[in-house]
């Protein structure tokens, strides 16, 4: 994982507990629908952040473990869990690329809005495969812009948050998952109307830099502009943003 991850998130943890995308009931129901959790499942939510995905899964599983590299994020998750009376969630400090669990531990693996921070996606996927039980499922949700919009957004992402590494396209995701041994059961790209101002606010981006990065999106040309279709509404920038929604199966022995 990028060495800048802790620095990027330790001071903005509370923002992610309020973020529209991260906490939206619609987006979290999307997680549950994709995961198809079972009451006896032991679930792992990798890069849990402030626990939003873990909280979505908790009512549907026996127990969920939320793992994250940033202590401040997990402190926020613990606080929210206590406020909501969620008793079947545990919180563990750890790296998605070196999970502190034995082989074949979990009935369900989940990761959401995080893999674009991982330095070595192949190692992260190998670890996901390793800790998942045979004949069980994993879900992967992450930003996945099409080309050439990715070329524009990549520069914005890198300057907005130095811990960003790369957003994979949907085809890249499928290829990597299959190389890791997974059978991809579902892989969809979902486009959202994206609130640029809130996106910058999650990372507490300085107004001057936010304005400069908005200019990169608004000045996009050709196919990138057609994909991003930026527009101002009441003075605020909105543009397209994409996520991959993937369900993958670890086949039985």
Image (cartoon, helix red, strand yellow):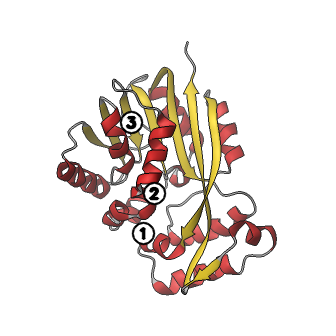
Cα–Cα gap, marks 1 and 2? 19 Å
Please state the horizontal and vertical placement of residue 144, each as a whole percent of the image.
63, 54
> In the depicted view, which residue is nearer to us: 197 or 30?
30
Q: Which residue is mark 1?
A: 202
Answer few, some or many: residues within 10 Å of disc 2's Cα (few below 14, many 20 plus, some between 14 and 19): few
Mark toward the viewer: 2 or 3: 3
| Residue 48 appearing in the image | no
Q: Is 240 left or right of 92, judged from the image as shown? A: right
Please state the horizontal and vertical placement of residue 61, each as a whole percent of the image.
33, 31
Please state the horizontal and vertical placement of residue 177, each as a whole percent of the image.
63, 35
Q: Which residue is mark 2?
A: 3
Q: Earlier in the sequence, mark 2 or mark 3?
A: 2
Q: Is 25 left or right of 182, judged from the image as shown? A: left
Q: Which residue is mark 3?
A: 44
Cα–Cα gap, marks 2 and 3? 23 Å
Disc 1 and disc 2 in contact, CB within 8 angstroms:
no
């Amino acid at each position: 994982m990028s060495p800048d991850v802790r620095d990027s998130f330790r001071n903005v943890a509370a923002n992610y507990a309020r973020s529209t995308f991260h906490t939206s009931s619609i987006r979290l129901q999307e997680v549950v629908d994709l995961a198809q959790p079972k009451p006896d499942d032991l679930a792992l939510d990798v890069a849990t952040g402030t626990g939003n995905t873990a909280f979505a899964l908790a009512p549907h599983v026996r127990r969920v473990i939320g793992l994250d590299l940033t202590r401040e994020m997990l402190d926020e998750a613990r606080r929210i869990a206590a406020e909501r009376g969620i008793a079947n969630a545990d919180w563990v400090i750890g790296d998605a690329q070196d999970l502190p669990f034995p082989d074949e531990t979990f009935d369900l693996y989940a990761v959401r809005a995080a893999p674009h921070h991982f330095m070595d996606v192949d190692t992260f996927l190998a670890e996901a495969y390793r800790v998942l039980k045979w004949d069980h499922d994993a879900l992967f949700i992450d930003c996945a812009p099409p080309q050439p919009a990715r070329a524009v957004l990549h520069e914005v992402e890198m300057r907005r948050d130095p811990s960003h590494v790369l957003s994979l396209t949907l085809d890249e995701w499928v290829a990597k998952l299959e190389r890791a041994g997974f059978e991809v059961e579902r892989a969809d790209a979902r486009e959202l109307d994206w609130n640029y101002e809130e996106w910058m606010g999650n990372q507490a981006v300085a107004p001057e830099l936010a304005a400069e990065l908005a200019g990169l999106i608004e000045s996009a040309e050709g196919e990138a502009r057609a994909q991003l279709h930026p527009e101002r509404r009441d003075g605020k920038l909105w543009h397209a943003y994409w996520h991959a929604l993937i369900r993958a199966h670890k086949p039985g022995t």
